[in-house]
Amino acid sequence: MIRILTRADDEKCQQLIQQEPAENLFIIGDIEAFGYEQDFQRIWGDFDEQGNLRGILLKYRENFIPYSQGEFDAEGFASIINECKDFSIMSGLKAVTSKVEPFLTKKHKSKRQMYYAKLDHQKSLSDEKLDHVMEATVNELPRLVNLLNSIPEFSGGSFTVEKRRHGIEKGVARSYFIEEDGQYISSASTTAENSMSAMIVAVCTHPDHKKKGYATQCMTKLCRDVLEEGKELCLFYDNPEAGRIYKQIGFEDIGYWMMYKF
Protein backbone atom coordinates (compact mmCIF):
# COMPACT_ATOMS: atom_id res chain seq x y z
CA MET A 1 0.00 0.00 0.00
CA ILE A 2 1.29 3.43 -0.94
CA ARG A 3 0.17 6.60 0.83
CA ILE A 4 1.46 10.11 1.52
CA LEU A 5 3.56 10.33 4.66
CA THR A 6 2.95 12.97 7.33
CA ARG A 7 4.82 14.18 10.37
CA ALA A 8 3.22 11.32 12.30
CA ASP A 9 5.15 8.85 10.12
CA ASP A 10 8.54 10.45 10.77
CA GLU A 11 9.77 7.77 13.20
CA LYS A 12 9.11 4.96 10.72
CA CYS A 13 10.59 6.99 7.88
CA GLN A 14 13.76 7.79 9.82
CA GLN A 15 14.18 4.16 10.86
CA LEU A 16 14.31 3.22 7.18
CA ILE A 17 16.45 5.99 5.69
CA GLN A 18 18.91 6.29 8.58
CA GLN A 19 20.09 2.75 8.00
CA GLU A 20 21.97 4.12 4.98
CA PRO A 21 22.75 7.81 5.62
CA ALA A 22 25.10 8.26 2.65
CA GLU A 23 22.70 6.60 0.22
CA ASN A 24 19.88 8.81 1.51
CA LEU A 25 21.77 12.08 1.71
CA PHE A 26 19.18 14.05 -0.27
CA ILE A 27 16.10 12.50 1.33
CA ILE A 28 17.42 13.03 4.87
CA GLY A 29 18.47 16.59 4.08
CA ASP A 30 15.18 17.55 2.44
CA ILE A 31 13.12 16.15 5.33
CA GLU A 32 15.28 17.93 7.90
CA ALA A 33 15.03 21.20 5.99
CA PHE A 34 11.39 21.17 4.87
CA GLY A 35 9.48 18.41 6.67
CA TYR A 36 6.37 16.73 5.31
CA GLU A 37 3.91 19.55 4.72
CA GLN A 38 5.26 21.81 2.00
CA ASP A 39 3.64 22.61 -1.32
CA PHE A 40 6.90 21.93 -3.15
CA GLN A 41 7.75 18.69 -1.31
CA ARG A 42 5.81 15.47 -0.83
CA ILE A 43 6.84 12.07 0.49
CA TRP A 44 5.08 8.79 -0.20
CA GLY A 45 5.63 5.53 1.66
CA ASP A 46 5.15 1.97 0.43
CA PHE A 47 4.01 -0.41 3.19
CA ASP A 48 4.02 -4.21 3.06
CA GLU A 49 1.12 -6.40 4.21
CA GLN A 50 2.36 -6.28 7.81
CA GLY A 51 2.41 -2.47 7.79
CA ASN A 52 6.20 -2.15 7.59
CA LEU A 53 7.55 0.78 5.62
CA ARG A 54 9.70 -0.65 2.83
CA GLY A 55 10.00 2.15 0.27
CA ILE A 56 10.14 5.95 0.04
CA LEU A 57 9.34 8.25 -2.86
CA LEU A 58 10.33 11.87 -2.32
CA LYS A 59 9.29 14.69 -4.65
CA TYR A 60 11.21 17.93 -4.22
CA ARG A 61 9.94 20.47 -6.74
CA GLU A 62 10.39 18.76 -10.15
CA ASN A 63 12.69 15.99 -8.89
CA PHE A 64 11.65 12.49 -7.76
CA ILE A 65 13.92 10.21 -5.68
CA PRO A 66 12.76 6.64 -4.96
CA TYR A 67 14.45 4.52 -2.28
CA SER A 68 14.15 1.00 -0.92
CA GLN A 69 16.51 -1.64 0.40
CA GLY A 70 14.67 -4.52 -1.26
CA GLU A 71 11.31 -5.27 -2.80
CA PHE A 72 8.84 -2.42 -3.18
CA ASP A 73 5.90 -1.41 -5.37
CA ALA A 74 7.91 0.01 -8.27
CA GLU A 75 4.86 0.19 -10.53
CA GLY A 76 2.99 2.12 -7.85
CA PHE A 77 5.80 4.66 -7.52
CA ALA A 78 5.91 5.00 -11.31
CA SER A 79 2.16 5.68 -11.40
CA ILE A 80 2.62 8.59 -9.00
CA ILE A 81 5.42 10.00 -11.14
CA ASN A 82 3.40 9.50 -14.34
CA GLU A 83 0.47 11.46 -12.91
CA CYS A 84 2.68 14.44 -12.04
CA LYS A 85 2.67 17.11 -14.74
CA ASP A 86 5.62 19.19 -13.55
CA PHE A 87 8.28 16.52 -13.02
CA SER A 88 11.43 16.65 -15.15
CA ILE A 89 14.02 14.64 -13.17
CA MET A 90 14.25 11.24 -11.53
CA SER A 91 17.42 10.37 -9.65
CA GLY A 92 18.53 7.71 -7.22
CA LEU A 93 20.43 4.48 -6.73
CA LYS A 94 20.46 2.38 -9.88
CA ALA A 95 19.24 -0.69 -7.96
CA VAL A 96 16.04 1.27 -7.23
CA THR A 97 15.52 3.47 -10.29
CA SER A 98 16.02 0.51 -12.64
CA LYS A 99 12.88 -1.07 -11.16
CA VAL A 100 10.81 2.10 -11.62
CA GLU A 101 12.02 3.02 -15.11
CA PRO A 102 10.13 0.29 -17.08
CA PHE A 103 6.79 1.63 -15.80
CA LEU A 104 7.37 5.29 -16.70
CA THR A 105 5.26 6.51 -19.60
CA LYS A 106 7.25 9.69 -20.28
CA LYS A 107 10.39 9.09 -22.35
CA HIS A 108 13.60 10.46 -20.87
CA LYS A 109 15.74 12.93 -22.83
CA SER A 110 18.96 11.88 -21.15
CA LYS A 111 20.16 9.21 -18.75
CA ARG A 112 23.45 9.55 -16.84
CA GLN A 113 25.13 6.89 -14.73
CA MET A 114 27.78 7.81 -12.14
CA TYR A 115 29.70 5.84 -9.56
CA TYR A 116 28.44 6.45 -6.03
CA ALA A 117 30.99 6.04 -3.24
CA LYS A 118 30.96 6.60 0.51
CA LEU A 119 33.36 6.92 3.43
CA ASP A 120 32.25 6.08 6.98
CA HIS A 121 35.57 5.57 8.80
CA GLN A 122 39.00 7.19 9.22
CA LYS A 123 41.06 4.00 8.98
CA SER A 124 42.50 4.82 5.56
CA LEU A 125 42.97 8.55 6.09
CA SER A 126 46.49 9.88 6.46
CA ASP A 127 47.34 11.13 9.96
CA GLU A 128 49.82 13.73 8.69
CA LYS A 129 49.53 17.25 10.05
CA LEU A 130 47.67 19.45 7.62
CA ASP A 131 47.86 22.83 9.30
CA HIS A 132 48.30 24.49 5.91
CA VAL A 133 44.82 23.31 4.85
CA MET A 134 42.34 25.95 5.97
CA GLU A 135 38.56 26.13 6.18
CA ALA A 136 37.13 28.98 4.13
CA THR A 137 35.12 31.70 5.79
CA VAL A 138 32.66 33.99 4.06
CA ASN A 139 35.41 36.61 3.61
CA GLU A 140 37.53 34.15 1.62
CA LEU A 141 34.82 33.13 -0.82
CA PRO A 142 35.76 35.53 -3.67
CA ARG A 143 39.21 33.97 -4.04
CA LEU A 144 37.77 30.46 -3.67
CA VAL A 145 35.23 31.13 -6.44
CA ASN A 146 38.01 32.52 -8.65
CA LEU A 147 39.88 29.22 -8.23
CA LEU A 148 36.82 27.13 -9.07
CA ASN A 149 36.08 29.18 -12.16
CA SER A 150 39.68 28.70 -13.37
CA ILE A 151 39.40 24.90 -13.48
CA PRO A 152 38.89 23.66 -17.07
CA GLU A 153 36.90 20.62 -15.90
CA PHE A 154 34.40 22.95 -14.22
CA SER A 155 33.71 25.06 -17.30
CA GLY A 156 30.02 25.73 -17.57
CA GLY A 157 29.60 25.55 -13.82
CA SER A 158 27.71 28.20 -11.88
CA PHE A 159 30.09 29.03 -9.04
CA THR A 160 29.17 32.29 -7.34
CA VAL A 161 30.02 33.93 -4.04
CA GLU A 162 26.32 34.25 -3.25
CA LYS A 163 25.64 30.50 -3.57
CA ARG A 164 28.73 29.62 -1.52
CA ARG A 165 27.79 32.13 1.19
CA HIS A 166 24.27 30.74 1.38
CA GLY A 167 25.58 27.20 1.90
CA ILE A 168 27.98 28.23 4.66
CA GLU A 169 25.42 30.38 6.47
CA LYS A 170 22.81 27.60 6.36
CA GLY A 171 25.34 25.05 7.62
CA VAL A 172 24.88 22.77 4.61
CA ALA A 173 28.26 23.38 2.95
CA ARG A 174 31.91 24.06 3.79
CA SER A 175 35.12 24.45 1.80
CA TYR A 176 38.79 23.78 2.56
CA PHE A 177 41.69 25.26 0.60
CA ILE A 178 45.45 25.54 0.24
CA GLU A 179 46.96 28.96 -0.42
CA GLU A 180 50.34 29.78 -1.93
CA ASP A 181 51.72 33.29 -2.49
CA GLY A 182 48.29 34.78 -1.90
CA GLN A 183 46.60 32.52 -4.46
CA TYR A 184 44.20 29.68 -3.73
CA ILE A 185 45.65 26.67 -5.53
CA SER A 186 43.57 23.70 -4.34
CA SER A 187 40.21 23.10 -2.70
CA ALA A 188 37.55 20.57 -1.70
CA SER A 189 34.01 21.24 -0.51
CA THR A 190 30.86 19.66 0.84
CA THR A 191 27.27 20.29 -0.12
CA ALA A 192 23.84 19.04 0.98
CA GLU A 193 25.10 18.44 4.53
CA ASN A 194 22.58 17.14 7.03
CA SER A 195 22.82 15.72 10.55
CA MET A 196 24.04 12.34 9.30
CA SER A 197 25.84 12.77 5.98
CA ALA A 198 27.55 15.15 3.56
CA MET A 199 28.52 15.09 -0.10
CA ILE A 200 32.01 15.93 -1.37
CA VAL A 201 32.05 18.23 -4.41
CA ALA A 202 34.33 20.60 -6.33
CA VAL A 203 37.63 18.84 -5.62
CA CYS A 204 40.23 20.67 -7.65
CA THR A 205 43.77 21.97 -8.08
CA HIS A 206 44.88 24.88 -10.24
CA PRO A 207 46.45 23.56 -13.50
CA ASP A 208 49.82 25.12 -12.57
CA HIS A 209 50.03 23.15 -9.30
CA LYS A 210 48.87 19.65 -10.15
CA LYS A 211 50.55 16.34 -9.22
CA LYS A 212 51.65 17.61 -5.79
CA GLY A 213 48.98 15.92 -3.66
CA TYR A 214 47.20 19.15 -2.77
CA ALA A 215 43.68 17.95 -3.60
CA THR A 216 44.22 14.79 -1.55
CA GLN A 217 45.35 16.92 1.39
CA CYS A 218 42.26 19.13 1.15
CA MET A 219 40.00 16.12 0.99
CA THR A 220 41.77 14.38 3.87
CA LYS A 221 41.37 17.38 6.18
CA LEU A 222 37.75 17.85 5.12
CA CYS A 223 36.89 14.17 5.59
CA ARG A 224 38.54 14.04 9.01
CA ASP A 225 36.50 16.94 10.31
CA VAL A 226 33.19 15.71 8.91
CA LEU A 227 33.71 12.15 10.16
CA GLU A 228 34.57 13.44 13.63
CA GLU A 229 31.10 14.99 13.70
CA GLY A 230 29.62 11.51 13.26
CA LYS A 231 28.59 11.98 9.64
CA GLU A 232 29.16 9.74 6.62
CA LEU A 233 30.61 11.15 3.40
CA CYS A 234 29.60 10.36 -0.15
CA LEU A 235 30.44 11.51 -3.66
CA PHE A 236 29.69 10.94 -7.33
CA TYR A 237 32.37 10.34 -9.93
CA ASP A 238 32.61 9.07 -13.50
CA ASN A 239 36.36 9.55 -14.01
CA PRO A 240 38.32 6.36 -13.18
CA GLU A 241 41.44 8.41 -12.37
CA ALA A 242 39.51 10.43 -9.80
CA GLY A 243 38.02 7.20 -8.48
CA ARG A 244 41.49 5.84 -7.73
CA ILE A 245 42.32 8.93 -5.66
CA TYR A 246 39.08 8.65 -3.70
CA LYS A 247 39.68 4.97 -2.99
CA GLN A 248 43.18 5.69 -1.68
CA ILE A 249 41.56 7.96 0.88
CA GLY A 250 39.14 5.19 1.84
CA PHE A 251 35.99 5.73 -0.22
CA GLU A 252 34.21 2.55 -1.29
CA ASP A 253 31.84 2.17 -4.24
CA ILE A 254 28.29 1.46 -3.07
CA GLY A 255 26.62 1.34 -6.45
CA TYR A 256 25.62 3.68 -9.24
CA TRP A 257 23.65 6.90 -9.03
CA MET A 258 21.31 7.53 -11.93
CA MET A 259 20.05 10.86 -13.25
CA TYR A 260 17.15 10.85 -15.70
CA LYS A 261 16.02 14.08 -17.36
CA PHE A 262 12.63 14.28 -19.04
Image: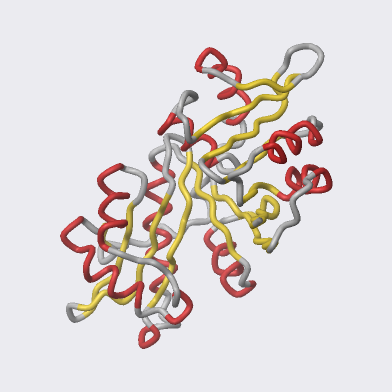
Task: Give x and y (percent) for residue 71.
Answer: 81, 32
Q: Nearer the viewer, residue 80 or 179?
A: 80
Asked where in the image residue 79 lies, by quadrant, the reply is: top right
Relative horizontal placement of residue 56, taking residue 202 as reference (left or right): right
Relative horizontal placement of residue 111, taking residue 226 as reference (left or right): right
Q: Is residue 50 above or below residue 65?
A: above
Task: Give x and y (percent) for residue 36.
Answer: 49, 24
Q: Is residue 6 above or below residue 218?
A: above
Q: Residue at x 65, y 47 (%)?
A: 92
Q: Nearer the viewer, residue 107 or 55?
A: 107
Q: How is the image coloured?
A: secondary structure
Q: Nearer the viewer, residue 223 or 236?
A: 236
Asked where in the image residue 34 lies, by quadrant, the reply is: top left
Asked where in the image residue 185 lies, by quadrant, the reply is: bottom left
Q: Is residue 238 above or below residue 259?
A: below
Number of labels in the image equals 0
Q: Residue furthest bottom?
A: 208
Q: Residue at x 65, y 31 (%)?
A: 56
Q: Is residue 18 above or below residue 181?
A: above
> The C terminus lies in which quarter of the figure?
bottom right
Q: Residue furthest front?
A: 85
> The N terminus lies in which quarter of the figure?
top right
Task: Give x and y (percent) for residue 130.
Answer: 31, 62
Q: Nearer the viewer, residue 82 or 171?
A: 82
Task: Give x and y (percent) for residue 82.
Answer: 72, 40
Q: Residue at x 70, y 52 (%)?
A: 255
Q: Residue at x 64, y 57 (%)?
A: 261
